[in-house]
Image (spheres, grey):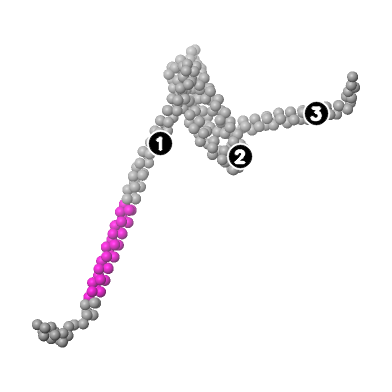
Amino acid sequence: MFDIDWMSLALPLAYITVLGGSLYTFSTIYRKRKASESANLEPWFPPHLQRNIYLTLLHMEPEPGQEKVPKVPDSVIRAALLRRAVEDIHRIIQIRTSKQALNALLQRGSVGDDLNQRFVRAEKEIEEELRDVVTEANALAPGWGQTIFQSANEIAANTMLRTRLEEIDSRAAADKEWWDKRREAIQKDFMKELDGDSSTKGSTKGASDDDAVLVDSATPASTPASKKKKGGKK
């Protein structure tokens, strides 16, 4: 049997114990600190109004003086859940469009780590929100969770198209006024160019007439000798 010298092993064991305890304490404090900082960060999205409306309709409490809560129709609850899914579609689109730009800014060092933490937390929240909506949809109507986001996507696309058309219609009057002013300015510039061309042609024609008169006056008159020669030929 080997004799173990516990006295010589006491120091290394104490060192390992102290080191492990220190690392555990540091890790715990660090994780709590990061969690506290993450909780204090400003959320990426504003409060989810459609979700709050749905939960309010789903868990209505009786008002003072009422013994029983009036039953909310299922169609109203389904419509509220569908509006909640539409808002989730808008947030998913915003997450997807912002992710690439945020990654590029992080690589350049243009933004801090706080913004990235807010974005990561928003991604996790939207994933949990999607799962919650699917669960609620299946609870209201079996199998609806598989098609609710398809319907919500169509509604969101139609809403965006309608908003775009309204913006175009609102700018139609201003654009028409701008084009009318632009056309008048172009017409004025064109008329000025025509007037300039006509005046230039008139001055050129007058100068050519003057040159012709000068040439005629500079030509010598016929001499009598030439007239006699012409008479002799006859």
Q: Is residue 227 left or right of residue 94?
A: left
Q: Cβ–Cβ below 8 Å for labels 3 and 1?
A: no
Question: Could you tell me the amino acid type at mark 2?
Answer: Gly
Q: Alpha carbon of mark 1 to alpha carbon of mark 2: how far? A: 34 Å
Residue 16 marker = 3
Q: Quadrant of residue 18?
A: top right
Q: Which residues are magenta?
A: 184-213
For label 1, the residue is 164
Residue 73 picture quarter: top left
Q: For the stretch drawn in magenta, what is the main secondary structure?
A: helix
Alpha carbons under labels 3 and 1: distance apart: 67 Å
Q: Along the polypeptide, which appears first: circle 3 or circle 1?
A: 3
Residue located 44% across and 22% down the image: 79
**Does the magenta portion include 202?**
yes
| Callout 2 secondary element | loop
Residue located at (53% from left, 23% from top): 131
